[in-house]
Amino acid sequence: MGSPSPQENYGRAIGQAGPPTANSTHSYWHRDPCKRLLGHRTTSELQSTADVVIVGSGITGTFAARELVSRGRSVVMLEAREACWGATGRNGGHCQPGIWDSPVETARFELATFDLIKELVTKHNIPSDWQVIGGVHPIFSPELLTAAQQQIRRLQRYPDLQHKAVLIEDKDELVSKHAPNAVAAIYQPNAAKLWPYKLVTWLLEQLLDDHDATVFNLQTNTLVQCLKRRGSSLIVHTERGQIRAQDVLLASNAYTSYLLPEMLRLDEESGLPILDPTGT
């Protein structure tokens, strides 16, 4: 007999993600984990209801939880592994808004996000290795330089953005910006590096400190198996029970197609997600 197909092996469509593995590789960025959050379960049993269930405890889910509880909504956060153990916890962060190469509204949105994180870290002195260092985008061809010049001219029409990106063509300055072989470069002063795991775990601890379990409830090592619609509610099925929620936020990155197999799958050639709201 031949080898089984991926569908036979895993019981899912080709291109559909599986659940997070319980035996993930060890990340450099987890070498000093938050002891309080390891194995954390705010309550020993799952709550039966919540306004919002958030699946995933990375930077997206955590900032969303922060905003939701500040607006009076109760949140249960479910994480298949340890807190912030997926993509957010497995990299050194590069926080740089796309200014020079983005539509104006996108640039403003990303700049506001940068300012939010900067002000939050500064106000609370969050130990996340945050450091504003600026960002350099080297340009290596005359054709790209022409396009960059057009983009910089476009930004001059917007007073709030015109100084957020600068075109550098001076050779000495290019050397100082570590781009000696480039014909030019775009420099954006609003760019920082940070340790995302430390930022997110600090925020999660603050949520736990500031709210009781009826408002914010974190459940690690709780795999979400599927979602089902029941009337106007959503039922979140886990290996430890079910939760009825008004809304569910999937902050699950690459694993989202596992929870929405009828709507989302990965393109076999590009590896990019394909959204199919009809489920066809």
Image: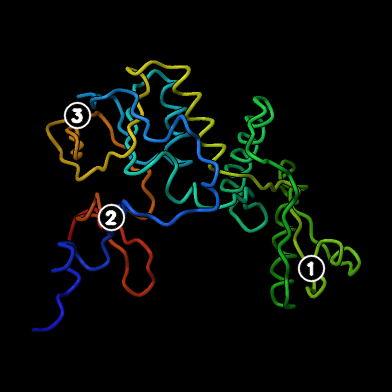
- Name which residue type carries label 3: Arg
List the single residue furthest toward the bottom. 1
Give whichever of discs 3 and 2 has the lower sequence position. 3
Give whichever of discs 1 and 2 has the lower sequence position. 1
- Name which residue type carries label 1: Ala
Q: Percent x, y for residue 149?
A: 75, 65
Neighbours of disc 1 within 10 Å: few (<14), some (14-19), many (20+): some
- Name which residue type carries label 2: Ser
Q: How far, Cα to Cα, is label 3 from label 2?
A: 21 Å
The reply to whether callout 1 and callout 2 are in contact (CB within 8 Å) is: no
- In the rendered image of this protein, does residue 86 appear above or below residue 124? below
Q: Residue at x 17, y 30 (%)?
A: 232
Q: How far, Cα to Cα, is label 3 from label 1?
A: 54 Å
Left or right: residue 69 versus residue 173 is left
What mark, if any, has residue 179 been given in the picture? Answer: 1
Residue picked out by circle 3: 244
Left or right: residue 159 versus residue 235 is right
Q: How far, Cα to Cα, is label 1 from label 2?
A: 40 Å
Neighbours of disc 2 within 10 Å: few (<14), some (14-19), many (20+): many
What mark, if any, has residue 257 been given in the picture? Answer: 2
Q: Percent x, y for residue 86?
A: 42, 49
- In the rendered image of this protein, does residue 216 appear above or below residue 159? above
Q: Residue at x 50, y 52 (%)?
A: 90
